[in-house]
């Protein structure tokens, strides 16, 4: 970040943070060459967050937390001197491929303008896409509203600001349950969402947000149905939110095994927004639940083609998912293995596994497999008369499935046997070394790792 005189400042990064020492560096690193100033509003950190911000040259201001995200956001932007404001959270990164487009926007005439960007929510299992106005022109009194899930959309609409629908992408990692405490976020947000509804009972957005919030817990699904249905009755005209409400309702009815109602919700979502992915995946899940296995596979193949042909991540569904190809093919393999064609499924599994580039891609294959199905697969390989040249690959997969449930006792003999029988590759050797390390056999682990150094 180059220091400039106030008259030269084009883009100000504005953030609110608390105890983000694990994430902040990566966020600031992603924008340091494109922003002219960094405004960090700290709401009470007791770790190294402030020090890290200062190391990047950020201007740090302090703010007493008041259970109101909009007040904090508005406090942060009042310090911004740039013509444009980009606002982000610490668990986000500006996608490097978006910088040229962002720079071109900075050259446009200065007028009331909101820039709609794509939020790419990345987790170990899937990618979900949303959108938000994350960049806007400064000095036109554009303000945030909502005490949680804060937005500038209200402000933009009131002043009839111009909207630019960009291809800028911000990568967001905060919904990855493997890395972030979702229960803590949900506990924090719930009373704020209720306050929003009490303050604005006729506003459709709080109803949508509370419905989505309740949908994440099986114990509160009936509340989710209530609030999402209420949102739909308010006739918001927001097609992306409407499509998302229907697919969320479909997920709830699927979990209740109310397949007819689930199918109705998916159909309504597609009527609202034909350009989406998650509805097609839901059709596959409904087909599987109805034991219409070939229909389910047909939907998965259609979805794979749709993803491969997609020229952008823009969707008509506000909370769409772009499932990885491994995720989709893994589901299809499961359907074949236990219901249609076991031999075909084994060949498909071997090909898919051999093409995997790492742990996350391996894990994605089994996202739709429950523990019983995974154990059934292991048992079928151990008891199988299969003697093909790729038998070791199938055992490799069995070992991996044991590791997914931290069963090192059963994984150890599989990987040891593979190595002893000269099925040595980086994955098997590193995995065996890791198991020995877990068991305290550091000498054996070191010996294995040295063999591939």
Image: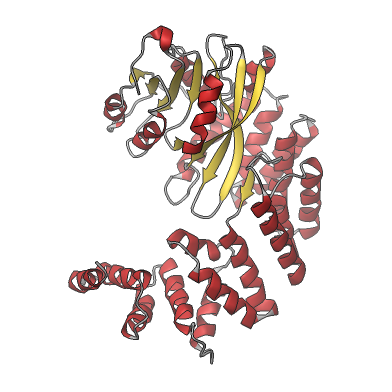
Residue 233 x, y percent position in the rendering: 80, 34
Horizontal side of residue 233 vs 21, given as left or right: right
**Residue at 46% of width from left, 19% of height from top?**
11
Work out whether residue 357 can be spotted. yes
Name the quarter where the N terminus is drawn.
top left
Q: Residue furthest left?
A: 443
User: Where does the image place residue 251, in percent across and percent down from the top left?
Assistant: 68, 52
Residue 345: image location, x then y, percent: 62, 77
Residue 252 or 134: which is nearer the viewer? 134
Q: Estimate the x, y position of residue 213 in percent, counting from the top left.
A: 60, 40
- The foreground one among 394 and 230 is 394
Say whether residue 128 is left or right of residue 398. Answer: right
**Quadrant assignment for the C terminus:** bottom left
Depicted 188 relative to depicted 10: above or below: below
State whether residue 292 appears in this view: no
Q: Residue at x 49, y 31 (%)?
A: 99
The residue closer to the viewer here, 313 or 185, is: 313
Q: Residue 196 is drawn in which quadrant?
A: top right
């Amino acid at each position: 970040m180059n220091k400039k005189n106030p008259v030269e400042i084009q883009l100000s990064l504005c953030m609110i943070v608390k105890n983000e020492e694990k994430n902040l560096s990566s966020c600031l690193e992603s924008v340091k060459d494109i922003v002219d100033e960094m405004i960090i509003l700290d709401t009470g950190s007791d770790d190294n967050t402030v020090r890290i911000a200062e190391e990047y040259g950020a201007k740090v201001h302090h703010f007493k937390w008041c259970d109101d995200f909009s007040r904090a956001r508005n406090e942060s932007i009042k310090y911004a001197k740039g013509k444009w404001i980009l606002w982000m959270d610490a668990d986000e990164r500006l996608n490097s491929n978006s910088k040229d487009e962002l720079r071109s926007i900075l050259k446009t005439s200065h007028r009331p303008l909101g820039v709609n960007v794509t939020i790419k929510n990345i987790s170990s299992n899937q990618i979900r896409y949303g959108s938000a106005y994350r960049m806007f022109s400064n000095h036109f009194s554009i303000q945030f509203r909502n005490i949680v899930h804060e937005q500038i959309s209200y402000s933009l609409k009131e002043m009839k600001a111009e909207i630019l629908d960009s291809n800028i992408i911000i990568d967001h990692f905060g919904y990855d349950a493997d890395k972030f405490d979702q229960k803590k976020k949900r506990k924090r947000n719930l009373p704020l969402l209720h306050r929003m509804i009490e303050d604005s009972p006729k506003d459709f957005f709080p109803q949508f947000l509370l419905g989505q919030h309740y949908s994440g817990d099986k114990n509160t699904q009936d509340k989710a149905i209530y609030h999402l249905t209420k949102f739909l009755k308010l006739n918001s005209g927001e097609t992306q939110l409407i499509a998302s409400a229907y697919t969320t309702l479909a997920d709830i009815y699927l979990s209740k095994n109310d397949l007819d109602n689930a199918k109705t919700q998916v159909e309504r979502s597609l009527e609202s927004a034909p350009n989406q992915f998650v509805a097609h995946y839901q059709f596959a899940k409904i087909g599987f639940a109805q034991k219409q296995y070939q229909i389910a596979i047909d939907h998965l193949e259609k979805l794979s083609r749709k993803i491969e042909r997609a020229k952008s991540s823009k969707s008509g569904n506000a909370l769409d998912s772009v499932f990885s190809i491994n995720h989709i093919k893994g589901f299809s393999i499961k359907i074949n293995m236990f219901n249609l064609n076991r031999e075909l499924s084994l060949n498909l599994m071997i090909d898919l596994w051999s093409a995997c580039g790492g742990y996350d891609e391996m894990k994605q294959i089994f996202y739709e497999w429950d523990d019983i199905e995974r154990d059934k697969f292991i048992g079928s390989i151990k008891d199988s008369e299969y003697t093909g040249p790729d038998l070791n690959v199938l055992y490799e997969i069995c070992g991996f499935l044991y590791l997914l449930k931290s069963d090192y006792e059963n994984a150890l003999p599989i990987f040891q046997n593979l190595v002893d029988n000269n099925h040595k590759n980086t994955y098997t050797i590193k995995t065996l070394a890791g198991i020995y390390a877990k068991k305290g056999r550091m000498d054996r682990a070191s010996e294995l790792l040295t063999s591939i150094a």
